[in-house]
Amino acid sequence: MCGRYVATRRPQDLVDQFDVTRWDPGQVLGPSWNVAPTDDVWSVLERVDHDTGEVTRQLRPLRWGLVPSWAKSLSVGAKMINARVETVAEKPAYRRAFAKRRCLLPADGFYEWQAVPATETTKARKQPYFISSEDGQAMAFAGLYEFWRAPDVSDASGASDADAPGAWWTTCTIITTDADDAAGRVHPRMPLAIAPDDWSAWLDPAHQDPGELRALLTAPAAGHLDARAVSTAVNDVRNNGPHLLDEITDAPFDG
């Protein structure tokens, strides 16, 4: 799975990198070295303008943890931060989004934890690793997004109000697969990515062939990944900052 990741690029840089045509500068997300489930994250997606019919590429903040349109509570999203590539096109929670609502989630890299068995002098524990592209390039995780309307939002008169603040939420999930390369030596699952040449095909809401869409899903950095042990400070979602990426040298790497 992918339960934490790093996203520090400025929105202006993401606009340039992903050829975004619509972004509201009033929407601000700061850099994060410890992105956690239910956090707001930057996403790149394409939507059809209802007035002009034009498809626009947008940079938008989404809540990490997909909430299907039929869910009764927003809390469902905390358990749906990842969608398995093996079943994403068939599972009721994801299949409609896979067909029509795909996005990219920019990331510097992601964290995974390796189980370290107990010894005569130490307890069993989990060692965190930061996994990123060997060349330091940003990744574009394959994601899905969904719209969810809160059932209990009403106006001053008590009537249901679809336009009230908090009435609508837009949420997302990251598609994952079996891990290989450095990531596989740490954890059996890893996020999938979309290569730059395939961004347009992945984002196009009119592109709905499941087989062709699956063919666009690849390992981040084409499998050329670097994994380095980092401090357990990342375990606490309240901790944030570039120091979380500092390498520690006394951690085992049981490949």
Image: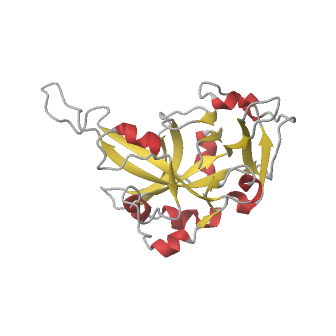
Instruction: State the image coordinates of residue 225 (x, y, percent, origin top left).
Output: 76, 54
Instruction: Give the image location of residue 159, x and y in percent.
Output: 13, 32
33 with respect to 225 (left or right)? left
Q: Nearer the viewer, residue 153 or 131?
A: 131
67 or 167, nearer to the observer? 67
Residue 168 image-quadrant placement: top left
Residue 39 at x, y percent in the picture = 51, 35
Question: Where residue 91 sits: x, y (%)?
Answer: 40, 61
Q: Is residue 21 visible?
A: no
Residue 255 can be seen, yes or no: yes
Residue drawn at the location 23% of the way across and 33% of the way down: 152
Q: 232 or 14, which is in the foreground? A: 232
The single residue placed furthest to the front in the displayed view is: 120
Locate residue 73 relative to residue 94 in the image: left or right: left
For the residue pair 157 and 123, the one nearer the viewer reads as 123
Q: Is residue 29 above or below residue 133?
A: above
Q: Is residue 51 left or right of residue 156?
A: right
Colour option used: secondary structure
Question: In the drawing, does residue 88 fall left or right of residue 160?
Answer: right
Residue at (43, 51) in percent of width and height: 145
Question: How many numbered dots are placed on residues in this image?
Answer: 0
Residue lying at 75% horizontally and 40% vertically, measured from the top left:
117
